[in-house]
DNA sequence: ATTAGTGTACTAGTTAGATAGTACACTAAT
DNA sequence: ATTAGTGTACTATCTAACTAGTACACTAAT
């Protein structure tokens, strides 16, 4: 499972986002052990030092807890994880709204664009008027 | 008007986005002359070489036309500009949907988050149910 | 006690982005 | 003709990101 990284954003940031998303989606639960630095580096196709940085930053953000000699674990602080979910959601929405506003789109147009984009993919369209 | 750049994305890319947005919004029209490389570098607070790269890439994308000794102009190809608008819109929507999906959000939740985000700001809420 | 696996902390090197500076060729204004 | 302004093409340097490699300290398994 070598990851496909976008050129616009630093790799370590993309990995933080990815692991955070997995946690929020429930793919990894509070208290779960994450793959070791070396293991995960091989899996994702990056250097171990890069992965080291990912875990270090995630620990600083309180998303994981690392135990020397044992490994790195998802935090058991459910509140922190809930907050992370909210923060990430807010960031994505903010960025989207800002970018679309910069292009001159109104809220209606954003929602419409969103609905039609997804509508094409799933044939489900609850908001069309 | 020194710009505030985000650390996640290369500066030159952010400038391409910004100028493109201005064109799409009608702040700069087809055929308009853009500020010179040096002038614009000072305005935005970057090095002239960085701005040089911005204009070079925008020319490669057909958004501007540069004339040696004269300056850089917004393309007069209206179709190209329309296409740019669509492309940028699509990119932003795609990125947003992908990110939110990665977090486990459904289309409904995306639209809801969008509506409530903007609703808080403008007291206008056309889609709440 | 030894080995395996873990995080951690380096050193060294490469690459992309960004900057500073310079100079040339072209166009327009004086 | 000269000057000013323009894009263009460099050289040199620095920084952040990323890689490769190494070794230490800790924990767990044998």
Image (cartoon, coloured by chain):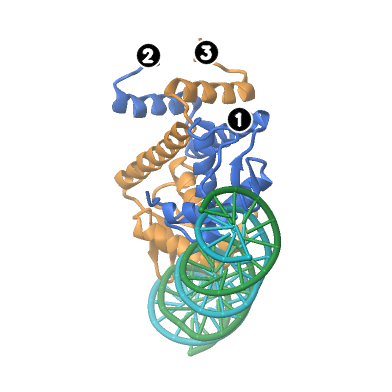
Chain colours: A blue, B orange, C cyan, D green
Can residue A10 be seen in the rendering of this structure?
no
Q: Position of residue B99 (x, y in %)?
A: 47, 37
- SS for dot 1: helix
Residues behind callouts 2 and 3 on a single chain: no
Asked whether the viewer can see residue A77, the reply is yes
Q: Nearer the viewer, residue B2 or A89?
A: A89
Residue B72 against residue A16 in the figure, above or below: below
Q: Position of residue A38 (x, y in %)?
A: 50, 57
Q: Nearer the viewer, mark 3 or mark 1?
A: 1
For the residues labelled 2 and 3, say whether their Cβ atoms are less than 8 Å apart. no
Graded by Cα atoms within 10 Å as few (under 14), some (14 to 19) or many (20 or more), the crowding at tag 3 reads few
In terms of depth relative to the viewer, which is nearer, D27 or B110?
D27
Q: Residues within 10 Å of mark 2 (few under 14, many from 20)?
A: few
Whether residues under marks 3 and 1 lie with C-beta atoms below 8 angstroms apart, the answer is no
Instruction: Tell me the residue that label 3 is attached to.
Output: B128
Residue position for label 2: A129
Pair 2/3: label in front: 3
Whole-number angstrom distance, CA of label 1 to CA of label 2: 30 Å
Which residue is denoted by mark 1 in the rendering?
A86
Q: Quadrant of residue B55?
A: bottom left
Q: Chain of mark 2?
A: A
- Rendered view: A22 above or below A122: below
């Amino acid at each position: 499972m070598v990851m496909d990284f976008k050129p616009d954003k630093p790799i370590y940031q993309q990995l933080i986002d990815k692991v955070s998303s997995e946690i929020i989606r429930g793919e990894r639960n509070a208290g779960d052990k994450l793959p070791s630095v070396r293991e995960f580096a091989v899996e994702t196709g990056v250097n171990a030092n890069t992965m080291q940085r990912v875990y270090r930053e995630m620990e600083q953000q309180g998303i994981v807890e690392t135990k020397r000699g044992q490994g790195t674990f998802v935090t058991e602080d459910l509140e922190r994880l809930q907050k992370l979910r909210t923060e990430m959601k807010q960031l994505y929405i903010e960025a989207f709204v800002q970018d679309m506003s910069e292009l001159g789109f109104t809220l209606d147009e954003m929602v419409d664009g969103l609905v039609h984009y997804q509508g094409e993919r799933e044939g489900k369209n609850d908001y069309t008027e």
